[in-house]
């Protein structure tokens, strides 16, 4: 892999979105890119992406980017960080890749207090593969793989809260929402700062997926506002 070559993360010219119309990923990636540039850390920042919608991030940043197998973002991020301790490692994964197949590696990285930053995007479904039931799906939620609704006794996975039971006391754990970009940027910055200080950090971001939710603009915002009532935003640890 080549050495980082660029002083800034974001491209100077806007690029058309490769995400579905109304997708929240564009908001998340723009906020993250702005934070990286404001912190002036682009030359030493490397991003790891999962198999999922987040892999499209590689087309928007002037950063070295690594794609891994589904659910393996955290171990890859940790491995690179151990090899290049002066790097700023940021891993991005969806709620499926992070809380299902990727949960073991994710929790143990938090337990070891590995100095990496993980961003988990929670839209309550597996988005890229068609909208199936995910660990974060809500009770009664109708998805392509739960046409009669999720079992009522199946509560969603609360990622930051779960991670708090595993993580070092110095870890930074928070939940943001695409509906509050200033707070999202603040949490992303704090997470990266905590990594630089030598600790694990994680930000879950509540996002929307109108394509698989099958919602119009108004319904999408209402759905996301409802998610904020269930998955409380704020700092969980740190």
Image (cartoon, grey):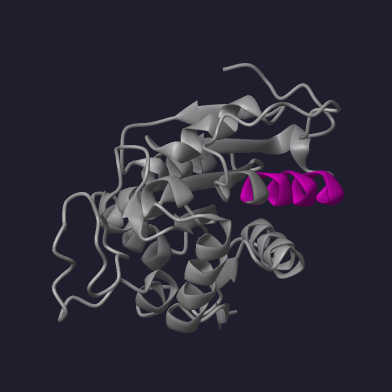
| Residue 40 in the image, given as x and y percentages of width and height | 84, 44
**The quadrant where residue 103 appears:** bottom left
Q: Residue at x 77, y 52 (%)?
A: 35
Q: Is residue 221 left or right of residue 134?
A: right
In the foreground, 99 or 27: 27
Q: Is residue 201 visible?
A: no
In the foreground, 38 or 131: 131
Instruction: State whether residue 24 is above or below residue 56.
Output: below
| Residue 215 in the image, given as x and y percentages of width and height | 45, 56
Chief secondary structure of the magenta portion: helix
Q: Is residue 20 left or right of residue 123?
A: right
Q: Magenta span covers which residues?
A: 28-39
Q: Is residue 188 magenta?
A: no
Q: Is residue 31 magenta?
A: yes
| Residue 145 in the image, given as x and y percentages of width and height | 16, 51
Quarter of the C terminus within the rendering: bottom right
Q: Residue at x 48, y 33 (%)?
A: 55
Quarter of the N terminus within the rendering: top right
In the foreground, 2 or 217: 217
**The quadrant where residue 15 appears:** top right
| Residue 72 in the image, given as x and y percentages of width and height | 34, 41
Q: Residue at x 18, y 68 (%)?
A: 150
- The number of numbered discs placed on residues in the rendered structure image is 0
Q: Is residue 108 visible?
A: yes
Q: Is residue 1 left or right of residue 189?
A: left
Q: Residue at x 72, y 63 (%)?
A: 181
């Amino acid at each position: 892999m080549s050495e980082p070559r660029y002083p800034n993360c974001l491209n100077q010219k806007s690029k058309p979105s490769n995400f579905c119309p109304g997708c929240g990923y564009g908001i998340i990636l723009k906020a993250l890119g702005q934070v990286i540039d404001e912190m002036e850390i682009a030359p030493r920042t490397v991003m790891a992406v999962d198999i999922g919608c987040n892999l499209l991030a590689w087309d928007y940043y002037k950063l070295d980017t690594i794609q891994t197998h589904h659910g393996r973002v955290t171990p890859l991020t940790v491995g690179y960080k151990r090899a290049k301790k002066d790097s700023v490692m940021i891993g991005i994964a969806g709620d499926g890749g992070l809380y299902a197949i990727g949960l073991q590696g994710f929790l143990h990285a938090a337990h070891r207090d590995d100095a990496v930053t993980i961003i988990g995007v929670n839209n309550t479904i597996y988005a890229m593969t068609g909208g199936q039931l995910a660990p974060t799906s809500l009770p009664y939620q109708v998805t392509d793989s739960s046409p009669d609704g999720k079992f009522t006794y199946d509560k969603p996975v609360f990622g930051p809260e779960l991670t708090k039971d595993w993580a070092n006391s110095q870890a930074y754990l928070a939940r943001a929402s695409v509906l509050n970009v200033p707070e999202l940027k603040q949490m992303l910055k704090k997470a990266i700062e905590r990594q630089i200080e030598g600790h694990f950090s994680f930000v879950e971001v509540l996002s929307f997926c109108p394509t698989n939710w099958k919602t119009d603009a108004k319904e999408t915002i209402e759905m996301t506002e409802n998610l904020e009532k269930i998955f409380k935003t704020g700092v969980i640890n740190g």
